């Protein structure tokens, strides 16, 4: 791989060069980005790069960052802006097994690419551990094909971002963790066809995971304050 100037990547993707960062939260969900900015009392939002981003405070003059990434495989580009750092990804996923229902919150232990390469992730032990596969879309024959391939590879869930981000994290020495909220069951319950109970389950879990991310950041604040 050719040498990559991370400062140039940061400047282009984020609009500025980062300093004093020990943890990054990334999400392709705009509503989650807005909620996290409010919960973590984010400041200095930057909108001049490719991806909106904001700082939040930790301890010992360290700070974290929240980044709104695009949906899909291009979300992996942001991983190339970092090295030797903790990155927490929050997104939505589709369940491939009956025991993982809509509204379930899961933590990815490993991600399997379409060519069978497995990338391990960093786990916190907070949620049910799953193997994640890749699907680039939600509807139609292509979605069904990718989901079938993920099932054959032993995956429990699929999403559009985690596989690529996990692979990029290994290349960039990033400690990558992923939490997903299950929003559909491909081939059985579509994301656009949820009944009121399932909509309620999903909404509650999406609110809960924001609080869980806040709690996760609080543990990092305590950890850093003890150093």
Image: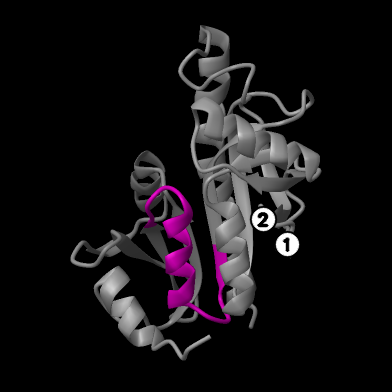
Along the viewing direction, whichever of 207 and 75 lies nearer the viewer: 75
Along the viewing direction, whichever of 219 and 188 lies nearer the viewer: 188
Query: Is residue 60 visible to the viewer in this orientation of the structure?
Result: yes
For residue 117, the mark is 1
Residue at image position (55%, 61%) is 165
Quadrant of the rendered structure where residue 42 is?
bottom left
Q: Left or right? Give the position of 90 relative to 6.
A: right
Residue at image position (35%, 86%) is 7
Q: Give the range drawn in magenta.
A: 68-87
- Residue 118 coordinates in the image, percent (x, y): 74, 61
- Dots 1 and 2: beta carbons under 8 Å? yes
For residue 147, the mark is none
Residue at image position (40%, 60%) is 66
Along the viewing direction, whichever of 181 and 160 lies nearer the viewer: 160
Q: Does the magenta stretch include residue 73?
A: yes
Q: How crowded is mark 2: few (under 14 residues within 10 Å), some or many (20 or more)?
A: many
Q: What element carries label 2?
A: loop
- Residue 177 coordinates in the image, percent (x, y): 63, 59
Quarter of the C terminus within the rendering: bottom right
Residue at image position (43%, 67%) is 78
Determine whether 227 is above or below 56 in the image. Answer: below
Quadrant of the rendered structure where residue 166 is?
bottom right
- Toward the left, the furthest residue is 48
Determine whether 21 is above or below 50 in the image. Answer: below
The residue that mark 2 highlights is 113
């Amino acid at each position: 791989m050719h040498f990559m100037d991370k400062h140039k990547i940061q400047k282009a993707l984020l609009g500025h060069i980062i300093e004093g960062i020990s943890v990054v939260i990334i999400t392709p969900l705009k509503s989650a980005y807005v909620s996290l900015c409010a919960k973590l009392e984010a400041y200095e939002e930057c909108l001049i790069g490719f991806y909106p981003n904001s700082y939040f405070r930790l301890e010992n003059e360290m700070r974290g960052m929240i980044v709104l990434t695009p949906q899909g495989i291009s979300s992996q580009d942001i991983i190339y802006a970092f090295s030797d750092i903790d990155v927490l990804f929050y997104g939505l996923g589709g369940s491939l097994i009956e025991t993982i229902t809509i509204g379930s919150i899961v933590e990815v232990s490993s991600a399997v690419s379409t060519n069978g390469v497995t990338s391990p992730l960093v786990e916190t032990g907070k949620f049910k551990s799953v193997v994640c596969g890749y699907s680039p879309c939600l509807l139609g024959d292509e979605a069904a094909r990718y989901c079938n391939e993920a099932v054959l590879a032993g995956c429990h869930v699929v999403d559009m971002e985690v596989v690529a981000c996990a692979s990029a994290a290994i290349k960039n020495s990033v400690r990558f963790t992923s939490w997903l909220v299950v929003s559909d069951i491909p081939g059985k319950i579509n994301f656009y066809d949820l009944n009121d109970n399932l909509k309620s389950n999903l909404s509650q879990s999406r609110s809960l995971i924001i609080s869980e991310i806040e709690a996760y950041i609080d543990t990092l604040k305590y950890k850093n304050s003890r150093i």
